[in-house]
C-alpha cells in the first residue's frame, strides 16, 4: 500500500504552493527515495553515498558490522555510481501548455516544470549532468549539460518559463540531437498536440544520436474526458481557431479520438524504443519518478 503521507507530498496540490523549484525538487525526491523499500539505483560504485537498512537478499559483504556491533542493527553501505551521463530535459512551453481546468491545481506547464525540476534533481543526485531545453516556436531556454550552471541553472531557468506561441517540436528535437553529443537520456515533456503525424520520425532522432528516450505526455483531465455541459465556445490557444458546440453531444466521439491520439503517441514511442507515460496534471509525481528510475537503472 502506498504511504498516504508520501502520496500527499507528491500531489500537485501541495507542490503547486512551493514557488522555489530547488526546495520543491529536494522535498519531492528525498521524500520519494525515503519511501522506497529498496532503492532502484543504489549500485556499488567507487564513492560511498549513504546507509540504508539491510534487506533480505543483500550482499553481506556490504553490511557495516561495526554499526551492527554498536547499534544492534544491520545497515548496508550504498555507493553512488559515477556514470557521468547526460540527462537532457526537453520541455514544451507553447501556449497549449498553459491550460488549467477546474480539477487541476496548476497548468500543464507548471506541472511539467515541477516534474522537470524533480527529474533534474534526481539525475544530479545520481551524478549525471543535467540540461534543459524549453521551446515553443523556437528554443528560448537552453542550459547545456555540464555548462550554464548545471542543476542550479536548470532550476533557475524553470522558474522563469512563460507559456506562449506555437510548438515547433521538430526544431527543438533537431537542436537537441545535434547539440548534445555525449551518451545519455533525453526526457521529452509535452502534451504532444500537433505532433502525432510526425512523432515516429522525431523520436528516431533519439536513437540516431545514441540517446535513450523517455516521453511524458502531460494532459489536463479536461482534455481526456470533456466534462463540460451546456453550449460552449472552445478556442485553439495556438492557432486562434474556435468552435461552438454542446459537449454532451460530442463527448463519446471526442473521448474516442483522444484515446486514438494518445495511443498513436504511445505506439510511436514503442516502435522507437522510447519509454512512454501518460500523465494527468492532477496526479502525483510518483509514477513519473519511478518510470525515470526504471529507465536509468537499465543504462548502468
Image (tube, rainbow, N blue to C red):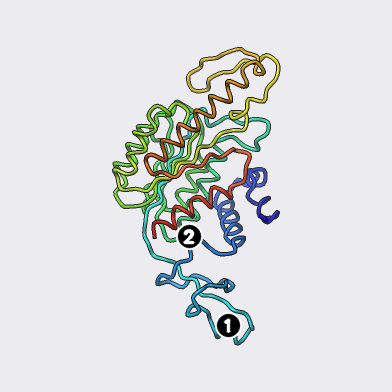
Q: Is residue 78 above or below residue 138?
A: below
Q: Position of residue 29 (x, y in %)?
A: 56, 56
Q: Position of residue 297 (x, y in %)?
A: 44, 58
Q: Which residue is mark 1?
A: 67
Residue farthest toward the top in the current orientation of the protein: 244
Q: Position of residue 273 (x, y in %)?
A: 38, 44
Residue nearer the viewer, 108 or 6: 6
Labels 2 and 1: the sequence-earlier one: 1
Q: Position of residue 295 (x, y in %)?
A: 44, 52
Q: Which residue is mark 2?
A: 125
Which image quadrant is residue 171 in?
top left
Q: Is residue 82 above or below residue 109?
A: below
Q: CA distance from mark 2 to mark 1?
A: 25 Å
What residue lies at 61% left-to-right and 17% top-to-bottom?
A: 250
What residue lies at 51% left-to-right and 75% top-to-bottom?
A: 77
Tell me the quarter of the image containing the C terminus: bottom left
Q: Is residue 231 above or below residue 287?
A: above
Amino acid at each position: 500500500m502506498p504511504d498516504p503521507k508520501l502520496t500527499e507530498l507528491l500531489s500537485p496540490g501541495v507542490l503547486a504552493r512551493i514557488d522555489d523549484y530547488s526546495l520543491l525538487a529536494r522535498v519531492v525526491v528525498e521524500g520519494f527515495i525515503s519511501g522506497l523499500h529498496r532503492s532502484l539505483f543504489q549500485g556499488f560504485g567507487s564513492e560511498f553515498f549513504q546507509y540504508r537498512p539491510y534487506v533480505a537478499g543483500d550482499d553481506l559483504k556490504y553490511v557495516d558490522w561495526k554499526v551492527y556491533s554498536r547499534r544492534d542493527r544491520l545497515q548496508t553501505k550504498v555507493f553512488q555510481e559515477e556514470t557521468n551521463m547526460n540527462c537532457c530535459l526537453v520541455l514544451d512551453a507553447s501556449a497549449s501548455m498553459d491550460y488549467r481546468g477546474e480539477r487541476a491545481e496548476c497548468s500543464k506547464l507548471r506541472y511539467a516544470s515541477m516534474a522537470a525540476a524533480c527529474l533534474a534533481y534526481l539525475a544530479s543526485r545520481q551524478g549525471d549532468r543535467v540540461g534543459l531545453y524549453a521551446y515553443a516556436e523556437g528554443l528560448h531556454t537552453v542550459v547545456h549539460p555540464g555548462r550554464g550552471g548545471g542543476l542550479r541553472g536548470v532550476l533557475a531557468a524553470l522558474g522563469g518559463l512563460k507559456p506562449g506561441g506555437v510548438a515547433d517540436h521538430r526544431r527543438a528535437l533537431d537542436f537537441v540531437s545535434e547539440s548534445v553529443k555525449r551518451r545519455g537520456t533525453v526526457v521529452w515533456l509535452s502534451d504532444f498536440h500537433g505532433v502525432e503525424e510526425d512523432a515516429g520520425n522525431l523520436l528516431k532522432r533519439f536513437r540516431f544520436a545514441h540517446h535513450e528516450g523517455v516521453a511524458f505526455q502531460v494532459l489536463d483531465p479536461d482534455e481526456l474526458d470533456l466534462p463540460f455541459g451546456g453550449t460552449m465556445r472552445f478556442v485553439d490557444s495556438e492557432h486562434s481557431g474556435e468552435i461552438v458546440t454542446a459537449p454532451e453531444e460530442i463527448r463519446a466521439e471526442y473521448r474516442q479520438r483522444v484515446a486514438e491520439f494518445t495511443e498513436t503517441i504511445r505506439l510511436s514511442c514503442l516502435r522507437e524504443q522510447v519509454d512512454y507515460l501518460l500523465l494527468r496534471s492532477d496526479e502525483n509525481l510518483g509514477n513519473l519518478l519511478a518510470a525515470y528510475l526504471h529507465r536509468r537503472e537499465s543504462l548502468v
